[in-house]
Image: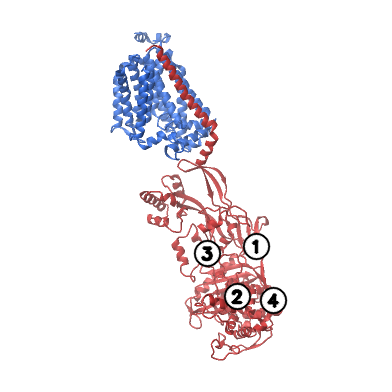
Chain colours: A red, B blue
Amino acid sequence: MDTDSPRLRLSILAVVVLSLFGALFARLWYLQVMVADQFQVEAAANRVRTVAEEAPRGRILDVKGRVIVDNRSSLVVTINPKDFNALVMADQDNLLLRVAEQLTRSGNPTKVVGLRAKLSDPQYNGLQPIPIAIDVPETLFQYFAERADEYPSVAVVRQSVRSYPLQPASTAAHIVGYVGRISGDELTAMQGGVTPTKPIDKPYQPDSEIGKTGVERAYETYLRGTPGIRTIEVDAKGRPVRTVSEQAPQSGDDVQLTIDIDAQRSAEDALAQQLAALQGKHQDDGTPTKAPAGSVVALDPTNGNVIAMASYPTYDPAEFVNGISQDRFDQLTKGGDQNNPLINRAIQGQYAPGSTFKLITATAALQRGMITANTSYTDTGSYTIIGCKPGAAGCETRTNSGGESNGTIALPTAVTVSSDVYFYWLGDRFFHESAQFGATGIQDTAKAFGLGQSSGIPLVGESKGLVLDAELAKKRHDDNPTAFPDGGWYAGSNVNLAIGQAQVLVTPLQLTNAYATFANHGTLYQPQVVLRVVKAKADPNDPNSVVMTTEAHAIGHVDLPPNIYDPLNAGFQGAIDNPKGTAHSAFQGFDTSAFTLAGKTGTAQVNGKADTSLFVSYGPAGSPRYVVAAVLEESGFGARAAAPVVRHLWETLSNQALTAVAPAQSGTSG
Amino acid sequence: MALSTSARSGPDRSRRDLSAPWRHTDPVLLVCTLAVSLLGLIMVFSATRGPTDPPVTSFLFKQGLFMLVGVVAMVVTASIDYRKYRDWIVPIYVATMLFLALVVSALGSTSKGAQSWFAVGGFQIQPSEMSKIVLILALASLLGAWKGDIDLRRLGMALAIAGIPMILIMLQPDLGTALVFIAITVVMFLIGGVRGRYLAVLALVGLMGITGILTSNVLGQYQKDRLTVFLDSSAKLEGPAYNVKQSQAAIANGGVTGSGLFQGPQTRLRYVPEQQTDFIFTALGEQLGFVGGATLLGLFVVIVWRIWRTAKLARDLLGTLVCVGVLAMFVFQIFESVGMTMGIMPVTGIPLPFMSYGGSSTVASFVGIGLVLNVHMHRFR
């Protein structure tokens, strides 16, 4: 080998080494200078996550600005079912055991079986994180946050949840409603969250909260906050490291109700006390008064605003915070309608109005000239239908429910003493003189007063009630002959209709609204529960903070000239003032000279059960500011059961000394 | 003789002796090596301090200690005439092979699928790092003595000397280090005068060997994946392909000037694995950008140039061979370790000299520089 060879070979080596370094320089230049932008985008994408952050909902206030529904911060431990199910069984058990240990240590006694049960609860769809412990302490939040890789699928999230500061928490529960996790159907329907009236983008996530009932649902678009968007940087294990950018969540608007919490409480207390007092007692014919349920409505007749609306039994909306268990939900709802506390009986319950319907029958007769205020009729205590052969079917003689005879009376007295015979006579004449007064005179007037149709109150699930006529009776029979074997319309049908029995059903709200229409001399308003919507936490009285104001909305009119209004008004006042009035005893001690009241009792028979007790009233006479009604199921005479509840609310509304709520001593069926 | 005279002449005279070996050291090589080491120390700290304060400093202090040990080892290595090593090479070689055999036996410890180190009092000692130096000395001794006169029998002997440690390391298995051995052997054979014919045949056999390894079950699937992932740009976003993708993204993220020391989002958030060892160039690339990366590569080029220059200046073939062996070791490790982070080389765990965290590799690299300095110092006598 010649001596030049090593030198040559060293040169070859130098060339190879230089090429290798040249390749490294070239690649470095390529990555950091030529394609850097493209890689930078990719790099940013894999370490940045966008998280939607739910905003607190708006508050719900009463008419004076007192907070009915507020928010509080709650720490919730969740397990993501998708990540959890990706673990092998042994890891799952081990994880749950450690989670249960930590929860128990932090004061939430937890067993693995319990966690398993929650994870398999069909309420959850397997995509959303499942809450396994709510309201956990801050220390647990830190514990899990620092050990994300030791506890896969477990997260602790800070949620703004509903709080109900009033005592009891169930106050106004049926009006405000409750919130819950959005359902699949709701998510589809609300996708985008934009409504024509409120063009603010409030997108929903699969685990978003949404109003389910009441005002929470009806005013969802206002109450829902605008979710915040947070961009966070995460490390290779997905643990958040820092926040890159943040668009803060915006609280939803506050909704101010027309409800006055003092009146609401008064109504709820009176109703609950009276039902409790009636339970275990008997009405005059010996039927036990079970008094399981009832409702109270107070309206402002000048605009249709709801001042109070109570329904019994009630529930605690706080139970729905962070999700209610399926067991508890079944317990609430599967006891049958009678016991279901989630039902708002004021708008969903349908009852025969009994004698309270005499407002309609009398107005129909007066408007059509069948009678005048002075037209007398002799109430002998019983009534036989015109042209009836004694003994024929449907021709049985009808009597006043108390059996009393009221003598020769005109309309005001007939209303005050609630003479059934007088109104049987009117009903009978509407049947036999239909050529002159129209076959559906009473029904037409009922509809003019808003019966048999939705009142339009902006709450979900309102019942329509029922006003039956010949045509509807036939259709009802044709559609379902088993349930309605007789599709005919007889003189007896009209006679029953005239005293609000059998042919007519009303909701307590409809009944109240019909009397409100009378009280304001003929304007039928759409009932409202919301006064206005104001910016979050703003002063409701500052005009600049008002987002929306509800205007009084007239939806119908009933012609009530003095020749119609005055005699009826006199009759209603007499029911309370006149010693013969049906509700006189219930209002003994109430200072009517300072606050003149007018009202009407009602007692509706229900097959095999105690009577439905009704009372509806308005005041002060002259320019009524309130209309108050109560309907108590299976409770007996209107004067004895419902009237004292209404009186209690009047005492609150007129600032009079409150008297104990108890069944009135006397009072007739009327 | 010359050495013994100067030893007897005493310290006073030696200071005035203009031909004393320490006066002929290579300051450029020394300065560049220390500069890279300091940069490495900073990057090890950056890669291990953690995303939050207070920073973790244990890696920083340990690496500083390794550097000190390395510098001492370099000075010791440089101060003993390299021709002396030839006399001791047989016992050194045999002892090293015994260590390598022990580490794959029950005494060794396993980490990340490879059994490659001993645990000694809190430190891990990897004999394979020092065995690279031993192989360089052994091959240089043989080839230097033969002076290019290499027949098949001598070639077989040299192959056996290189093959024994290679097989022991493949048993760990540590493919990356085995590849360094191949690079050292090939380059030393080239400079040591092995005939072109033989080199061609050896290259062919080597190629067949690699194909055989990749298609047989000698390697675990994960190792094959790591080795071939750079060939497949569409590989899914996990495992080795994910690492390489994240590493490239991090380097690209650095851009021209980098995101700032201690500031690299990709590396700070640990999207890149092993960034204080095998992927340390990624941390540097992201945080110091093209400026920093090119500076480091430039320093390496200077180091390699000074080694190559020493190989040329060496007074004998033994010195030349020692230098090219060290050169081959550094160049291959640099090209593999840096190329891997940029996606142009397969993923194998090879430390970047003077940069990667690790005692054994740091000390071995300093000893390599010590050998080159040694040859440089003794180029006249």
Which chain does the residue under circle 2 lie in?
Answer: A
Q: Amino acid at mark 4?
A: Leu
Please give the residue where the numbered disc 3 appears in the rendered image: A170
Q: Earlier in the sequence, mark 1 or mark 3?
A: 3
Q: Amino acid at mark 1?
A: Thr
Q: Which mark is residue B154?
A: none
Give the residue at x 29% y 24%.
Answer: B95
Badge 3 element: loop
Q: Which mark is residue A616?
A: 2
Q: Earlier in the sequence, mark 4 or mark 3?
A: 3
Q: Do the CB atoms of the residues marked 4 and 3 lie less than 8 Å apart? A: no
Question: Looking at the picture, how far across and down is residue A661, in whole percent?
Answer: 54, 74
Which-is-in-front pick, marks 1 and 3? 1
Res. B120 visible in picture? no
Which chain does the residue under circle 1 lie in?
Answer: A
* A465 or A548: nearer the viewer: A465
Both on one chain, marks 4 and 3?
A: yes
Q: Earlier in the sequence, mark 3 or mark 2?
A: 3
Which chain does the residue under circle 3 lie in?
Answer: A
Badge 2 element: strand
Instruction: Give the CA separation, mark 4 to mark 3.
Output: 40 Å
Please give the residue where the numbered disc 1 appears in the rendered image: A550
Instruction: Give the CA separation, mark 1 to mark 4.
Output: 27 Å
Q: Taking A486 as reference, is A363 left or right?
A: right
